[in-house]
Amino acid sequence: MVNNEKLEKSSEIEQLQEEITKFDEEIKNKLDQYQKSKQDCMCFPFLGVTITRRLVDEIFQELRTKYKDCNGRLNVVVDSGGGDIDAAYNLSMLFRKYGCNELNFLVPRWAKSAATLLVCSGNKIFMSPVAELGPLDPQITEMNPLERRLEQFSPLHVRATLDIIREEFEKGHDKLAKELTQRLQFPITLGRFIKSSDIAEQYLVKLLETRMISGDKKTETAKSIAEKLTKGYADHSFCINIEEAKNIGLNVTDLEEVELDIIWEIHRLNRKREDLKEKLRREKVKEMIKELPPELLDKLPEPISDMLKTEI
Amino acid sequence: MELVMENIGLKIAGALLIKYGELSVRDIQAIPFFSDSPHIETVIEYLTRFYNAEIYTKRIASSTIPEWEQIIRLRK
C-alpha cells in the first residue's frame, strides 16, 4: 500500500516536471518570436527574479556567454518584485554595457521597488495596461531591541514618526512626546535609515540623466522624477501604472498589438509554469518534512512568533 | 491562531535548515504553515539571524530559460 502511494506520487511528480518543461519550451519560442519581430534584437528574460548581490554575478555570466553578439541592442522582459538597491544599480550598468546602443525594458505586470530602478536605466520602458512600477523608498527589517521584535518599515515612516513627536512637543504634550522619544532607536541608527532613501534617489538621478532623459533640463527633470519615486508616495505598494509613470516624466510607451500579444503570453506562460513549480515544491517540502527526525524538532527552541509582527 | 501556525512553521523551517544545511526561499514559502503569509521576508530574516545562516543566489540548472533562486544556507 505504502509502495503504491509512493509510485503514484513519483508519477505525479514526473508529470508535473514534464509540464514545466513544456512551458519552458513555449516561453523560449515566444522569446524567439519576439526577437525576430524586432529585427533580431536579443531579448533577455528577467522573470520571477529577486535582485540580490549574488544575482549580479549570475546575470553577468549569462550575458557574457549568451549575449556577447547582441550588437549593442538589448530588450529585457522584467517580472520582479525588487530586492537590493545597490545590486539593482550594478545590474543596470551591466545591462547598459550590453545594450550600449539601445536598451529597452518590457514590463508585462511587475517591476516594483528596486526593479523600478532597473527599468529606469534604459532608453524606454514598454508597459502593458496592467503593468506596475513602484516607489523606491527602501524597506528596512531591523530588530527592535526594546521589544525584541523584527520590524519592517520605510525611512518615510521614520520621518513621519519624528514629525508626530515634534507636533506633540509643539502642542505642549511633553509627557507623550518624551514617552514616544524613549521608544525610538538610537539617533545614529535613525539617521542611517533616513539616509538610505537618499541612496536610491542618487542612483535614480545618475541613471535617468545619462540615458532616458535628455535635453537642457535633464538633470532637473531626473531629480524631480527621483524625488517623486523615493519620497512622493504614501506606501511602498503604491501602483504606478502607465499613466502615472508618464505623468511623473518617465519615457514610457504602451505595449500594443503583436508586441503586447507576445509579451503578455510570455508572462501568462511563466505564471502557469510558476504555479506548477509551486505545486512541485509543496510535494518536495512535504517529503522533506516527513524525513525530519522528531527529536530534532523537540530540541529546537520555541520561536517567538511575536517577532514576526511588523509594525511601527 | 495565525501566529500559532507561524510558530510551527518557523520551527519546521529551522529544523529543515539544520537537517539539510540549506533551503531555498521558495521551499520556505511552500511550508504549509506559511501559505499566504504576509511575513515571509521577516521569516527569512529570522532564519538568517537565529541560525547563523547566509543567503546566496544560484541558477536553476534544469531550466532552459535562465532562472535563479535564493538559497539560505548555514554558515560553515
Image (spheres, coloured by chain):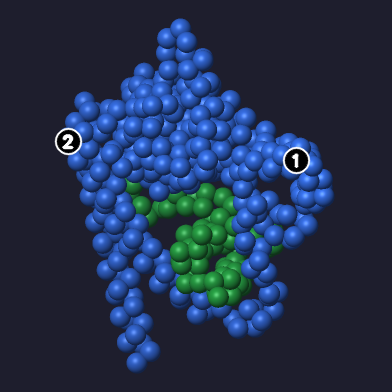
Residue A41, image x, y percentages: 27, 27
A243 or A79, which is in the foreground? A243
Residue B13 lies in quadrant? bottom right
Q: At 66% across and 66% down in the image, what residue appears?
A: A306
Q: Residue B12 sits in which quadrant?
A: bottom right
Q: Quadrant of the N terminus of chain A?
A: bottom left
Which residue is disc 1 drawn over? A171
Q: Residue at x 22, y 28 (%)?
A: A38
Determine whether the residue tagged by mark 1 lies in a helix, strand or loop. Answer: loop
Q: Residue A139, image x and y in percent? A: 58, 45
Circle 2 sits on which residue?
A258
Q: Which chain comes out green in the rendered image? A: B
Three-letter amino acid code at disc 2?
Answer: Val
Image-quadrant location for residue A62: top left
Residue A37 visible somewhere in the drawing: yes
A135 lies left or right of A159: left
Report the number of discs.
2
Q: Nearer the viewer, residue A18 or A153?
A: A153
Crowd rating for badge 2 (residues with CA inside 10 Å; few <14, some 14–19, many 20+): few
Q: Which chain is blue?
A: A
Badge 2 element: helix
The label nearer to you, 1 versus 2, is 1
Q: Chain of mark 1?
A: A
Task: Pick the residue in front: B38 or A46.
Answer: B38
User: Against A162, is B22 above or below?
Assistant: below
Q: Amino acid at mark 1?
A: Lys
Kindly report the distance in space between the C-alpha atoms of the residues bearing marks 1 and 2: 61 Å
Please state the horizontal and vertical placement of residue A52, each as a whole percent of the image. 54, 43
Q: Is residue A286 above or below residue A137?
A: below
For this view, does B15 lie left or right of residue A72?
right
